Amino acid sequence: MIPPTNPLSDNAEARPYVPVKGATVRRLTASAIARRKGKSAFPVVTAYDAPFGRFAEEAGIDVLLVGDSLGNVVLGYDETTPVTLEDMIHHAQAVCRGTSRAHVMVDMPFGSYQVSDEDAVRSAIRLVKEGGGCSVKMEGGEHVADRIGAIVGAGIPVVGHIGVTPQTAGLGPGYKVRSNREQLLADARAVEAAGAYAVVLEVVDRDIAAEITQTLAIPTIGIGAGPHCDAQVLVLYDLLGMYPHAPSFAKRYAQVGDVATEALRAYADDVRQHRFP
Ligand code: KIV
């Protein structure tokens, strides 16, 4: 039987989610995540499909990000910029089908929010309404504050993303550690003031990430930003050893890519040697 409330959270405000007719379960809400600020660090992981969403949820991870890293690790692009809104909706739907309680954040892909507030709100609505996402994430600091405000104003929770912003990595110093303290603090404050309920700090100097974490009232979610953030996020394929270009800060917890290659080699050998079927 499906539990009436989310057993993973202290979540009084969980919003109903109805994946199958008659079966109402509750997902962790943005406000419940925001209330984790300053408590013990919590894990976030990216997910792109139903089985890995389920594995993550079974492992007790209740915040999943359908990241536009989808472009690199699943779709085979060199960048995240080719990822479309349709791609994100398609993969968000799969993650939602594979999970029942986790909060599913969905990245706004490049091109889905740059042109205008109206465009951004329309894109965010599609990610929630068609994709099933619980909230959306958007790259940028001060210069996207109005966009964040517009989407929050439309009733959709938003996560900010500052530091290294892969969609526009070509404009700045690429993937180098960000250490411009004044700008990072200004970006973090702007994102919070615009109404974001959390903010990703990607490849930010660890002392500055600690200061931002102390300064903001919303949780910081670090990736390559040191140990003092309220949460940590890793790209699933990096942590499982399924992506050859993982950044150096990404701890590898398994070599799933090697296991898969070995299994496929064994199968191929069996067929060639008439051991299977
Ligand atoms: O797309 C993604 O996976 C992300 C994480 C790196 C935070 O944005």
Image (tube, rainbow, N blue to C red):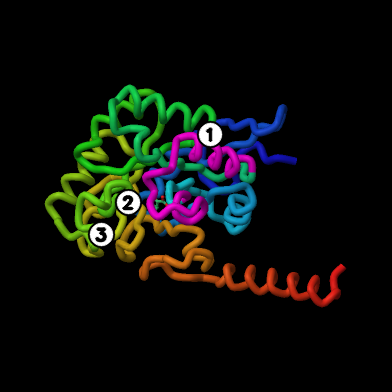
The reply to whether the magenta stretch includes residue 72 is yes
The residue mark sitting in front, 1 or 3, is 1
Front position in the image: 116 or 39: 116
The crowding category of the residue bearing disc 3, from other C-alpha atoms within 10 Å (few below 14, some 14 to 19, many at least 20), is: many
Label 1 and label 2: CA atoms lie apart by: 22 Å
In the picture as drawn, the residue positioned furthest to the front comes out as 272
Amino acid beneath label 2: Pro
Question: Residue 252 vs residue 138: left or right?
Answer: right
User: Ligand 1 near label 2 (Cβ, under 8 Å)?
Assistant: yes
Question: Residue 190 vs residue 232: left or right?
Answer: left
Front position in the image: 163 or 211: 163
Q: Quadrant of the N terminus?
A: top right
* Span of residues in magenta: 70-97
Amino acid beneath label 3: Val
User: Quick check: 239 above or below 67?
Assistant: below
Question: Where is mark 2, residue-wise?
Answer: 166
At x 67% / y 40%, what residue is drawn? 3
Q: Quadrant of the C terminus?
A: bottom right
In the picture as drawn, the residue positioned furthest to the left comes out as 182
Question: Where is mark 1, residue-wise?
Answer: 131
Q: Locate residue 109, reporting x and y percent.
A: 39, 40
Mark with earlier residue (1, 3): 1
| SS at badge 3 | loop
At x 51% / y 42%, what residue is drawn? 104
Question: Where is mark 3, residue-wise?
Answer: 204
Front position in the image: 214 or 246: 246
